[in-house]
Image: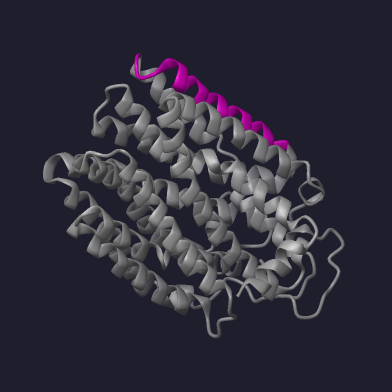
Amino acid sequence: MAAGYLDILRTRHAARLLTGTLVGRLPNATAPIAIVLFTRAEGGSYTLAGALGAAYGLATAVGQPLLGRAVDLYGQPRVQLPAAVVSALGMVALALIGLDPLPAAYAAVVVAGVFTPPLEGGLRALWPTVLGREDRVHRAYAMDAVAQEVMFTVGPLLVTVLVALRSPAAALLVINAVGVLGALSVVLSEPSRTWCSAPREAHWLGALRSPGLLALLSAFFFVGLALGSITVAGVAYADDQGRESVYGWLMAALGLGALIGGAVYGARQWAGAPERRLRVVVGLLALGYLPLTLTPGVPAMTALAALAGVFLAPAIACSFIVVDRHAPRGTVTEAFSWLVTTFGVGAAAGTAVAGPAVELGGTAWSFAVAGAGGVAALLVLLATGRVLAAPGRTPEVVAGSENDRNGAAEPGFSSGRKA
């Protein structure tokens, strides 16, 4: 299982790009818990915490495709690093201002969200040139999803440790400073500096002119909703147990489950259309969320959280392949950024709904939001099966995909970048 991943990590630049991207994304990955804990520490309610988290998520959703399109047009270094610095300054402002005045707090999280750098989409745009073969790129997608789960496992624990040692404000400052360093590491690398998007057809819709991509994004809105609701539901569950640290363990268990599932998924080659496989994986993901509504004791709840996470990374890795198959040529970063945006909008909706759900019906109701989101995602994939079964372009054989300025051919590598 590990041999394929080690082969990728031994490739020149691969480990640096993966590590830098993960570190650079740490502020975005930990923002939901950091905002919730900061708001609660400042005396704010769950509803206010959910509203601030929703504002951040919606701002990220707006900024990601815009910055992704800018990366496709102007290159990575000119967009990623300035965006990372401005986003960090937004969170610094929140930590210094607090919740009073409240409009300033909202403005701070909006700035931080809008300027979140599209490092995720940028990394996936770099993989074809760095790794070469299609099978290695697909394995890198799975490794990418697994590595994200390591980040989502370590990130919440890191935030809770920083909160315990200092304060939620200190956690915001440290996490965002580290994030800027991660972005800097990526943009100074040779693949990032020399990357150039493929020529694209001028169209105001950009990547969104693909019906298959729209169908996928619609489904993953509800996956994002499920994950966003779990952020608030987990904090409410920890409060019910009288131990703040329980939240970190629940989120770590969720990430550990996804890590295991993603590692197993990426260790083998899968036959058949990825769109069909995605429906199965999302169905299993939805099934894993439903038992969380039982809210048993901490040991059993931790086990259920781990089980709920098992199919998350496989679903994400499979979605990367589907995006690659349906995105129009020259929109690679933008297309992947739209996937991040969909998650952001869904997560914002989930956080906004789960906050009032806790106060109206208790913790179980907020976990029910997650189960409903998983079921809705499956229903969307089933309803759009015909659209997803017909990729917007036929795969073509190119060496460097979006990154190859000379377009040299390499037999056996299908990038699927035909408009």
Decide: is 396 above or below 19: below
Foreground of the two, 362 or 70: 362
Q: Quadrant of residue 385?
A: bottom left
Relative placement, left or right, of 162 versus 74 is: left
Outermost residue, bottom side: 271
User: Which residues are drawn in magenta?
Assistant: 78-100
Foreground of the two, 126 or 266: 266
Outermost residue, left side: 361
Q: Residue at x 68, y 45 (%)?
A: 71
- Residue 322 at x, y percent in the picture: 54, 69
- Residue 84 at x, y percent in the picture: 62, 34
Decide: is 292 above or below 243: below
Q: Quadrant of residue 271?
A: bottom right
Quarter of the image that includes the C terminus? bottom right
Q: Residue at x 57, y 44 (%)?
A: 25
Q: Residue at x 67, y 35 (%)?
A: 181
- Residue 243 at x, y percent in the picture: 27, 39
Decide: is 276 above or below 408: below
Relative placement, left or right, of 339 versus 406 is: left
Q: Which color mode does the image show?
A: one colour
Relative placement, left or right, of 233 versus 170 is: left
Relative placement, left or right, of 317 versus 133 is: left
Instruction: Let me know if residue 80 appears in the view.
Output: no
Foreground of the two, 108 or 388: 108
- Residue 184 at x, y percent in the picture: 71, 37
Secondary structure that dominates the magenta span:
helix
